[in-house]
Image (spheres, rainbow, N blue to C red):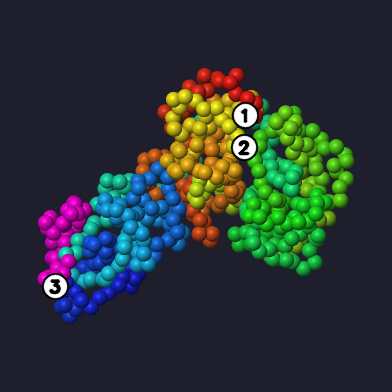
Amino acid sequence: MAKRAQHAAATSSSAAPAAAPAGDAARAPSASHVVVFGVAAERLGLRLEQVAEIIRPPKLAKMPMAPPSLLGLANLRGTVLPVLSLRRLLGWPDASAGDTARVIVIDRAAPFGLLVDRIDRLLRVADDAIAQDDAGAGQLDPGLLEGVIKGGEGRDTIKVVHPDRLLRDQFARLSSAGPRAAAGVAVIAGAAGRNEAAQHRLALLSFDLGAQEYALPLERVLEIIALPPHVSEVPRPETAVLGVVTLRDRLLPLVSLRTLLGFPDDLVRDGRAKVIVLSLGQGAVGVVVDRTRDILRVDPALIDPAPALLTRGEGDAEIAAICRLDHGRRLVGLLSADRLFRSELVSRVLSQQQEQGSVAGHQAGGDAVADEQFIVFRLGEQDYGVPVAAIDEVARAPERVTRLPKAPAFIDGVMNLRGRVMPIVDLRRRFELAANQAKTAQRVLVLDSGGGKTGFLVDSVSELIRLPAHAISAAPEVSADQARLIHRVANLEADGRIILLIDPAQLLDRVEADVLAKFARSRPDAALPAS
């Protein structure tokens, strides 16, 4: 990898007097290459053997609860690369990254990148030319340097930094850590022991078609993706079949649920349309809906058989049942995944899937056993994931919450969730992010810890995704809080995305859990209106 860095570094015909002439350097038994670069007005250097490569500033995923010197995480050919600001590490003010800015990737078992203002050249010097000289360090801490290369008259001194010493204060965990194993998430304490009534509730994914809300059993949902901008049409498709798209190198047929239910086939392309990927036998089919809403867990007593009149529409699908929510004010049509298509349409869709060379990518056996499902939510421009198994439900943010005096800043208040008081934690505040002004898409992720429910307010819920084991890796340890809460990342190289995977068991530490338990014991039920 050092050869790539040598090729990427800019060379120069001029050399400092301390550098050996080209002919002598070729015969010199002990010499080093130094990558010379600039930060602000300083000329700094790194030994070439420390450098893996030099790249342009990449797209970054922001990591919360990290030291300010961490700019974010980048996807470097499948490797998660922490990128640090050398300006901030040295305590210098920020400056806008110009066209000359580069990231020097440091060659380690767990590599990291340093953002610098510019690359000057590659310099070959005798080893004894890199001398210890505290006075030559200038305003820099001499402890950060391997030494200095003194310039001749009219030339600046080059200060050779040691990358591990740069990390000793803010990133000690990062500098000492090798690649970590991507261990699975811990089970939320008590979640496995939910009461019997909770275990028998039906998990549903609700969505909109026009002004009506419908739902499908969550257990049949493999994932949820945004409607692709381009759908490839297929010869002589069924009326409801829109075409096929590629989902992680496999063909996925798309079916219009509007057509199946006999609605006008007006495909909604407002940016909110979603594809619900359903398991269908040994294959998978994408069902296009206007927008997804919530993940619900419903008491079977609130589900009634659908009136016969609703099963006699013009479409192929039938409404299997009606869910009565919010004391009957919210009626949700429950569809059966097995009865979603008439039998002849099922066979044709699956036959078409096989003819197009699609492999049943979501089979019950095989590699799918190692897959994990996550609810993906957003805070600002960053994606986060929580295991589906840890989510009790996903609800809309309440119009108002009851504020609690003397509560920690990250506690938004408490809300009434079907007769039970539930504290709401604002994840933006918990992660020390700026406040969100746009609140229309906010959702509350409800986690059941066994002793009670806690809601986590997020900007939006974007998708449900199934990730193979090879896409999940250990997150770099940049701080103790981050390492405990976010110790895995999903690196989707094909999409250029990094999803930070949250361990739900660590979402509240012991002190915060005690605070929430105190609020639960106060039981301010009488002061709360029913939602």
Q: Quadrant of the N terminus?
A: bottom left
Q: CA distance from mark 2 to mark 1?
A: 9 Å
Neighbor class of circle 2 (other Cα within 10 Å; few <14, some 14-19, many 20+) is some
Q: Nearer the viewer, mark 3 or mark 2?
A: 2
Residue 63 is covered by the magenta coloring: no
The segment highlighted magenta reads 127-156
Q: Secondary structure at mark 2?
A: strand
What's the residue type where badge 3 is placed? Answer: Pro
Question: Where does residue 163 sit, x and y in percent of width and height?
Answer: 27, 56
Question: Where does residue 191 sit, x and y in percent of width and height?
Answer: 56, 31
Residue under the point 39% across and 49% down: 476
Q: Secondary structure at mark 1?
A: strand
Q: Nearer the viewer, mark 3 or mark 1?
A: 1
> Is mark 2 in CB contact (under 8 Å) with mark 1?
yes
Q: Which mark is residue 395?
A: 2
Q: CA distance from mark 3 to mark 2?
A: 69 Å
273 and 251: which is toward the camera? 273
Residue under the point 45% across and 53% down: 61
> Is mark 3 in CB contact (under 8 Å) with mark 1?
no
Question: Where does residue 249 sit, x and y in percent of width and height?
Answer: 61, 62
